[in-house]
Image (cartoon, rainbow, N blue to C red):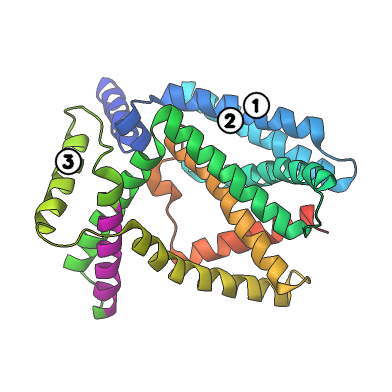
Amino acid sequence: MVVEQEHEESSKVNEEDDSISAILFNFSREDQIQFELATSGILSAATLATAPPGIKGHIIRVAALILAAIAVFHWSVNSSRFSDEEFYFEYTYRVVEFLGVIVAFHILHISVSLVLLTLPIPMGIATAHLVGAIVLSLISIIFIELIYHAYILFWGTAMYIYAASAAESVENPTTPLDAIVNYFLYQFSSQLSYLLLRDEIPDGDSKELQDLREFVSGIEETLDGEEEPSLLRLFVLAAAIVIPVFAVIAYLLSASVIRVPYLNVVFILFATRIIKHVIEVPALIFGTVMFPTYLQTNLRTILTIAVYTASVYWIFFI
């Protein structure tokens, strides 16, 4: 029994060390649980106070209550000596993310509706939600970066993990096409990670931080005398890939599920994706979400954003 208990405790430490937030920001599992409890409580209280009457209002209220209940459940399984908390954290994340998107979009919807009443110029409802989502995302990013210095460092580290995984796939490809795709993924991820990390790695002598420093130094040696990668060029490249994919998703949704003008579907889809970003980034940095749990295959990513967009449209735009 002692050996089993020591093995369980060791596994918990190793699993926690896999969390980027634990490695970079020294957040313990208890810190992450407390953040989740506080955030879900605030979102739920705001939602219960502002949800409209009717069936859709009841759905929004239920989403908020379930979100808070899952946070309490996470706290309870983490406190138990005999529960496999990582199993529950992993398999409840998509539910938490979906409910978080609904609750956060409700708050955005209420805010946009109030602003539209005071605007001196007319603006389409879908356009207003997209603008509001962008503003909310920028506020979130600026707050996280200015107060905690965590946003750039987190995504730089995440891109480093992407690059390491792509490099391994290049060395051991399943097909020639797989090798080519992963080579380009490695080039993109490593360059973006370098640009984000080169001035952001904090002091410390942990193995993980040392690996990041060695990675940045290796890229600098490779670039010695050559032109540095451009952040703008990398974002343009990413947009050239992402925007057509989202445009196709929006077209399929507008043709089969969402019977409104195509451009409105595009705006609703992008607003939904931005709100998803607002939810997932704090959850990854401060909360209980581990980076491997966050990752999805390309097909699952497309299906996820399609389901989220259709749900948001049905609840808030019909």
Magenta span: predominant SS is helix
Mark-to-mark CA distance, 2 and 3? 35 Å
Mark-to-mark CA distance, 2 and 1? 9 Å
Residue type pointed to by label 3: Arg
Is 182 displayed left or right of 101 in the figure?
left
Residue at the image point whose x is 43% and y is 47% from the top: 293
Residue at the image point whose x is 87% and y is 47% from the top: 55
Residue bearing mark 3: 213
**SS for tag 1?**
helix
Q: Are marks 2 and 1 in contact (CB under 8 Å)?
A: yes
Residue type pointed to by label 1: Gly
Q: Position of residue 290 (x, y in %)?
A: 41, 41
**Range covered by the magenta-colored residues:** 177-192
Sequence-first tag of 2 and 3: 2
Viewer-nearest of labels 2 and 1?
A: 1
Mark-to-mark CA distance, 1 and 3? 38 Å
**SS for tag 2?**
helix
Query: What label does residue 41 carry, if any?
Result: 1
